[in-house]
Image: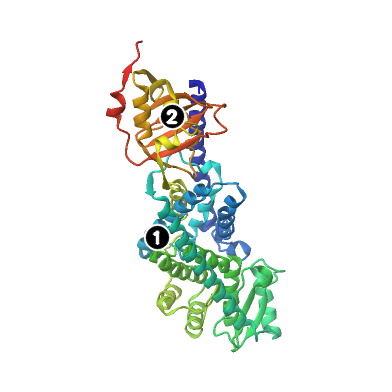
Amino acid sequence: MSVDEMLARTMSASSLLTKREIFCLVAAVAVAAAVSEKSFRDGDGTPLDGRRRHIPYLATFWLPPLMLIFALLPCFGLLSFRHVLSVLFSVLVSVCVYDALLLTALPLLRRYVSARTCAVLWLLPNYLVLLANLNQMKLDRPRWVVHLPVMAVQAACALWAAGFCAVLVGKIAGHLRFRRALLRRARPAEDPEWLALWRKVQTDAGFPSAPYRLVVSPAAATPLSIGLFPGALRVVLPERAYTAEELELVLRHELVHISRRDNVTKFFLVFCTALCWFNPLTWLAMDRSAQDIELGCDETVLLDADEGTRRRYAELLLSAAGDGRGFSTCLSASARSLRYRLRSVLHPAAERRSAAALVGVLIFALLSTGSWPALVADSGAGRDLLFPTGRPEDYTVQRVAWREDWESTEYTCADGAALTGLLGDLELGELDGNYATRSLGLPRGKDGGLIVEYAGPGGSYTAVLEDHYLELFPDAASAPVLSDRVYHLREPADWTAVFSLLEAAPG
C-alpha cells in the first residue's frame, strides 16, 4: 500500500469524525426544539389549544423493531455476529449508564424542570439505534475495551437472550391478558352527551376524524386508554357517573396520552428494561419514567388552568384509583406517586421551564459517547491471525517505518524473523462494531505507530502496530484471503523489544 493511499484513507476517517459531530449537533438541536416551551405556545405567549399542544414527545417505536431486525442480519449474511454483538454491548452499557445518571439527578430535575421535559429525558436512549445504522456515527476508536473469552461471551449471550425473551414475552402476555379481561364485557359508549363531548375534545385537540373508540367496561376501575395501534386503541371508562366538566378532564387526559403515543412509549420502556433486565436500576427507571409520563400529561391538561379546575382534577385522581397494567395509560395514580401528583396539580411551580437546552445537551452527549465501550472476544495469538496463508517464516519483511502525525522515519530490520516472532506472540482480539478503524491506513494513536510491510504466499499486506491496536491492510492480490481488520492488544506493545531489532535507515 502506497503512502498516498494511506493519506487518502486518513483524510476519509477525519471526515467521518467531523460528520459524526455535525450529526450529533443537528440531532440535539432538533430534539431540543421539539420539546421547547415555544412548541406549546403561540407567538404572543398564549397556550395553544390545537394539535400542536398535544405533539408527541418523540418517535418511540424506532428502537424495538430496528434492534430486532439488526440482530437478525447475521442470519442473512449481511453483518457478522461480532459486529452485532459489539453494537448491542455498546447500547446496553449506554442505557445502563444513562438510566443511573438520570435516576440520580431526577429529584433535582423535578424541582426545576417541567414534567414534560422529565418525561422526554427517559426516551432519549431511543436514538441509540442511530448508532447501529448510520455510517456518520462511526467512531475512530472505542474509549473502553472489555476482553472476554469466547466461551464466556457465548454463555453470557445465551443467558442474556433467555432473560430478554422471558421479560419481553412475559410483559406482552400480561398486556394481552389485561386487555382481554378489560374489553371482554366492554360496550360502546351510547350516552349522547358523552359522545358529543368526546367529539368536541378530539376536534379541539386537532383530531376531528380520529378512529379512537370510546367504550365502557365493568372491569375498569379507572379511565384508561389501551392499545398500541390506532385501529386497536380503545378509551375505556368505568361504569360510574361523571359531570360534564369531570368527563372533559378525563377525556382530555386520555387524548393527550394518545396524541403523544404514550402507550407505545410504555412498550419502548418495557423493551429497554428487557434489554437490560440484569440491571436493577433499569427496572427502577421504568417505574420513574411511567410516573413522569403521567406528570407530564397532568401538566399539559392543566396548562394555565384556574384553581377550581385544578381542585376538581385532584379530586378525580383521588377517586380513580385503579389498575393500569400492560401498555396502558390511566388517570389513576399509584400510591407511590399520588402525593407528588397531587402536589404538582394543586401547587404548580411557575418557574419550571421546558429546559430544551438541557435536552439538547443530553442528546448530544448520549449520541457522541455512543460506541465508546467495545466488547472483544479473544481471538488468539498473532501467528494464527496475521499469516493466514502459510507459516510465519514464509513471510518476509519488505519495509519498516515509524509514522507519527505526518512525519515518517524509515528503519532497517536485521532480523525479520525475530520481528515476525514478536508480532506472532501478541495476544489479539478482533475489534468489530460501529468503528471506522478498518478504513485507516496510518497510525491514529497519539504517539504514532509502526508500519511493517510483508510479502508472502498469495500477496502482500501492511501491518500497523500501535500501543493498543494492530491493523491489517492487504493489497488487491491478498484481499480474497485477508481483509482489512483491526485487533486490540491484551497488553500494550513492547516497544523496547521492537526497537531493539531496528536501526534507523541511512538518510
Vertical relation: 221 (above or below) 386: below
**Residue type at mark 1?**
Leu
Q: Secondary structure at mark 2?
A: strand
Residue at horizontal 71%, vertical 84%? 192
In the displayed structure, would residue 304 be above or below residue 494?
A: below
Q: Which residue is mark 1?
A: 102
Q: Nearer the viewer, mark 1 or mark 2?
A: 2
Q: How is the image coloured?
A: rainbow
- Compared across the picture, whether 343 is left or right of 303 comes to left
Q: Is residue 290 visible?
A: yes
> Could you tell me which secondary element the residue under label 1 belongs to?
helix
Q: Residues within 10 Å of mark 1 (few under 14, many from 20)?
A: some
From what the image shows, is residue 406 above or below residue 196?
A: above
Task: Name the spot of residue 398 as percent of width and height, x first.
Answer: 44, 20
Quarter of the image where one finds residue 216: bottom right
Mark 2 surroundings within 10 Å by alpha-carbon count, few (fewer than 14), some (14 through 19), many (20 or more): many
Q: Earlier in the sequence, mark 1 or mark 2?
A: 1
Q: Is residue 377 left or right of residue 225?
A: left
The percent position of residue 262, horizontal first and vertical second, equals 56, 67
Q: Amino acid at mark 2?
A: Ala
Q: Could you say where residue 390 lies in the image, as x and y percent from the top left?
A: 48, 31
Give residue 463's mark: 2
Q: Nearer the viewer, residue 15 or 67?
A: 67
CB contact under 8 Å: marks 1 and 2 = no
Residue 29 appearing in the image: no
Taking depth in this image into account, of 461 and 115 the one nearest to the observer is 461
Q: Tell me the residue at 49%/77% (across/down).
A: 310
Q: In the image shown, does 197 or 460 lie closer to the viewer?
A: 460
Please provide percent x and percent y for residue 77.
60, 47
Q: Quadrant of the C terminus?
A: top left
Kindly report the distance in space between the C-alpha atoms of the residues bearing marks 1 and 2: 43 Å
